[in-house]
Image: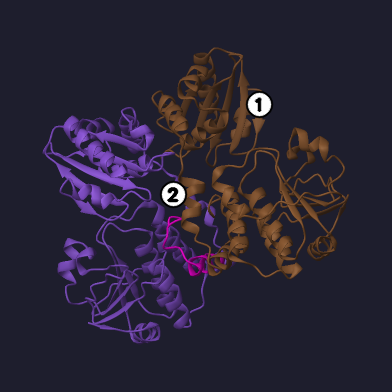
Chain colours: A purple, B brown
Amino acid sequence: MKHIDLNAAALRLLAAPAVLILAHSHPDGDTLGSAWALAHALRALGKPVRVLCEDRIPAMFAFMAGGLAQAALENAYIVSVDAAEESLLGDVFAREYHGRVDLNIDHHATNGLYAKDNFIDPSASASAEIIGELIDAMGVPMTSHIASCIYAGISTDTGCFRYANTTARSHLWAARCMELGVETEPLDRAFFENETKTYLALERMAFDNLRYFCDGRVALVAVTQDMFRRSGSNDEEYIKIVARVKNIEGVLAGAAIREKEDGSYKISMRTHPPVDAAAICARMGGGGHLRAAGAASDLPLEETIAMVVRNIEEALT
Amino acid sequence: MKHIDLNAAALRLLAAPAVLILAHSHPDGDTLGSAWALAHALRALGKPVRVLCEDRIPAMFAFMAGGLAQAALENAYIVSVDAAEESLLGDVFAREYHGRVDLNIDHHATNGLYAKDNFIDPSASASAEIIGELIDAMGVPMTSHIASCIYAGISTDTGCFRYANTTARSHLWAARCMELGVETEPLDRAFFENETKTYLALERMAFDNLRYFCDGRVALVAVTQDMFRRSGSNDEEYIKIVARVKNIEGVLAGAAIREKEDGSYKISMRTHPPVDAAAICARMGGGGHLRAAGAASDLPLEETIAMVVRNIEEALT
């Protein structure tokens, strides 16, 4: 359970005869990009490798495997990438690999240091940045395909260089990937532009009842179980709605209210400076971060809406 | 009307006692970022400068002026930035400065070379990239504020590094700007996340009548003059609708039909490979690019829709 640095991590990997790489469950571009970039680099060194993820791989990340032969491994050196906690490997994997991860490579400052050796760099915008540096440290020549995996990790984790975790280092990696021949436009189109028909249907139903309060400084939508049923959408897609509500011109506080299966309501709030979302939600028994917070309500919908609006209103004045 | 290179352009600017910089009309982040970055750099050299634009400056770009004193100029050296044609300076400016531009700095390959000296670099993702290199060539120290103008130009012209014009050079500039202290997240939030209430209202009306054809491979919306009136939106905002229609999962051809003031219709089409938007629109008497084209129709709305769908259908089979 100890911290090690970049060179120590590179040496551990160089010493391993065969490597099993674990991505976290509900895989995103960074855990998969990190896993596959590392796998291709280790394979280039002649090592048998295998990448495993408990959940289905989204189609837009399928290119990363790049025809690499997945080896049948026994007693392999086990590496996790981008997984801040053992539990994030997924229900099955967290049991199967409990206490067995040899090297934990991650960029989350909250990492639980659950492996024998842990190489954590919270200054990296994405784990893929760390993996790129590790590949350099191992002396493996960077290829265009490895670079495309690294680019995917960085681009998805920074919202295409838009989030606050973006750094000069993220852009320098992107520049290097492009110099190696990565065509980023088709990748980013697949990562960011696709919208499901089910989400679009849900958003349309929600936005048909979009309401403004406080001279347009507050916007609110409500999504019912009936809307989920009719649209075929789900909780995961629903999250995008509250971001869109927050981004409306002039809106300082955006709220989305979602009916849960038991008929109670979950309130999600996003705010712009100086509005404190956590403070508003705390007044309704909830909590969260300064600009993103939530609360629950057992009141009927209209009373829930009235409560939310009243609490935002008091915070705005 | 001759081409000059980077160093020649830098020498012309260094030799000028006072400089008037013209941005193009309907100003975007690149023309304004280029104009203000250059203005601050020339001011740092002690030269009186003035930045002019025929149209109103969008609020999100107001920071660029950074308190720079606009000089009253007579007989100044006149520079245009990011304006591919004299006419793009706007109706009034194109007349006022006709034949009077001394130096035309631009990245559009189609540039009309209307100035005495023209420095055109079509390999640049944005004119702001060229301006950054010009500032280096003039030996002016890059400041954080100048870098923020350059970043704004590059980020807005590349859709935050998402469009196909993005290059390693764009990312290298972004890295340098961040190293100089530019906080990119609030800038990109202002550039890309804001949605007007009027656009949202128009989109809602349009999407309430979103229709799918050909097993969901075709999506189509129609926007009427009545919708423009009720939403308070306009043509400029409307353009975003067709992009969103194209980005729906599984859609190969997205079309938006807009009723014009005279009651006729304008068809806008966006496609994904292998669908040829130009070929489809050509069959309706229109034209355009491979993946973005348009046509006009004097038929009633439902007949126009039927014509569009029939022509797409035939192209898909």
Q: Secondary structure at mark 1?
A: loop
Amino acid residing under circle 2:
Phe
Host chain of mark 1: B
User: Residue B286 shows which numbered tag?
Assistant: 1
What separation in Å lies between label 1 and label 2 (alpha carbons)? 30 Å
Could you tell me which quadrant the N terminus of chain A lies in?
bottom left
Asked whether residue A21 appears in the rendered view, the answer is yes
Q: Residues within 10 Å of mark 1 (few under 14, many from 20)?
A: some
Could you tell me which quadrant the C terminus of chain A lies in?
top left
Q: Please name the residue that numbered disc 2 is placed on.
A: A192
Across and down, in percent, residue B86 comes to 79, 41
Establish if A76 lies above or below A238: below
Across and down, in percent, residue A11 comes to 37, 87
Residue at position x 23%, y 37% in the image: A310
Residue at position x 62%, y 45% in the image: B28
Q: Residues within 10 Å of mark 2 (few under 14, many from 20)?
A: some
Q: Is residue B213 left or right of residue A278?
A: right
Q: Is residue B272 left or right of residue A72?
A: right
Residue A124 forms part of the magenta stretch: no
Establish if A122 lies above or below B187: below
Q: Is residue A157 left or right of residue A285?
A: right
Across and down, in percent, residue A123 comes to 40, 72
Amino acid residing under circle 1:
Gly
Tell me where residue B219 sits by quadrant.
top left
The range drawn in magenta is: A159-175
Establish if B299 lies above or below A265: above
